[in-house]
Each structure stands twice: as structure tokens, then as C-alpha cells.
Amino acid sequence: MDTVKRDILNNNRELIISDLHGDVFVSLQDKGVLTKEEYNSLISLDPQEKKNELLLNILFDKNDGLEQLIDSLKEWYPWVEFELKESLKNVSSKKASWVEAVAENL
């Protein structure tokens, strides 16, 4: 995962850790994002916050971890999905502004 996406997850870390539950793990495993071993490691932990911290660490090593997490949040956690998408939009608009500024100076 690139540093921009890592930053998005880290900037929303508290929300993710406090709000998510095990149903997201099932969805991510069904999509092939989590291996069986990763899934088993997650469900073996207590409390939920520790599970979610481990989930973030696992997602950091997945190229499309942020996108897959966002997709898995649609049904049960629309407020978390919204925050992550907004963070992506903000990065995209900043990047577009930077590109425009560079282009103007060429």
C-alpha cells in the first residue's frame, strides 16, 4: 500500500478501531483480501479494538487494502465508508491542485 493510502487509514484510525466489528473480517475474507490465517488471528483476539488494530496492520501490506475495506463497509458502516472516501477525495483534489500548479509553471 502506498504512503498516501496508509496516511488515510492512519488519519481515520480511531474511527476504524472504535466502530468496526467482526462482520467486516468475514467480508474481507470472502473477497480474498484476508487469508484464512489472517482471519483466524483476528478473531482470536480480544477486545474488538485489538482486532481492529491488527486489521489495520494487515491492510497496510495489501496493495488494494483501503479500497477493499471501503467496499466492505458499504452495508454496515456507511459513516466510516463516507469518512474514508472523503479522505480519498481530499487527497485527489490536493494532488490535482498540485499538478495544475506545476503545469502553470512549465
Image: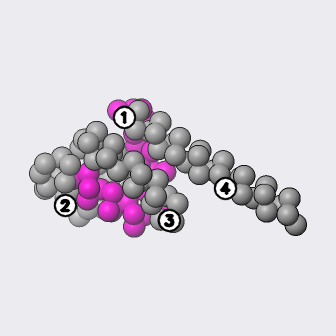
Q: Please, is residue 25 above or below residue 56 in the view? A: above
Q: Which residue is mark 1?
A: 77
Whether residue 103 appears in magenta in the rendering, the answer is no
N-terminal of the pair, mark 3 or mark 2, is: 3
Q: Which mark is residue 59?
A: none
Near mark 3 (Cα within 10 A), the count class, few <14, some 14-19 or many ≥20, is few
Q: Amino acid at mark 3?
A: Thr
Is 105 on the left-hand or right-hand side of 13?
right
Residue at screen point 32% across, 62% down: 57
Mark nearest the camera among 2 and 1 is: 1
Instruction: For residue 21, say whether it is visible.
Output: yes
Q: Which residue is mark 3?
A: 3
N-terminal of the pair, mark 4 or mark 1, is: 1
Q: Please, is residue 17 above or below residue 63 in the view? A: above
Q: Which residue is mark 2?
A: 41
Q: Amino acid at mark 1?
A: Tyr
**Marks 3/2: CA–CA distance:** 25 Å
Mark nearest the camera among 4 and 2 is: 4
Range shown magenta: 51-78
Mark nearest the camera among 3 and 2 is: 3
Mark nearest the camera among 3 and 1 is: 3
* Quadrant placement of the C terminus: bottom right
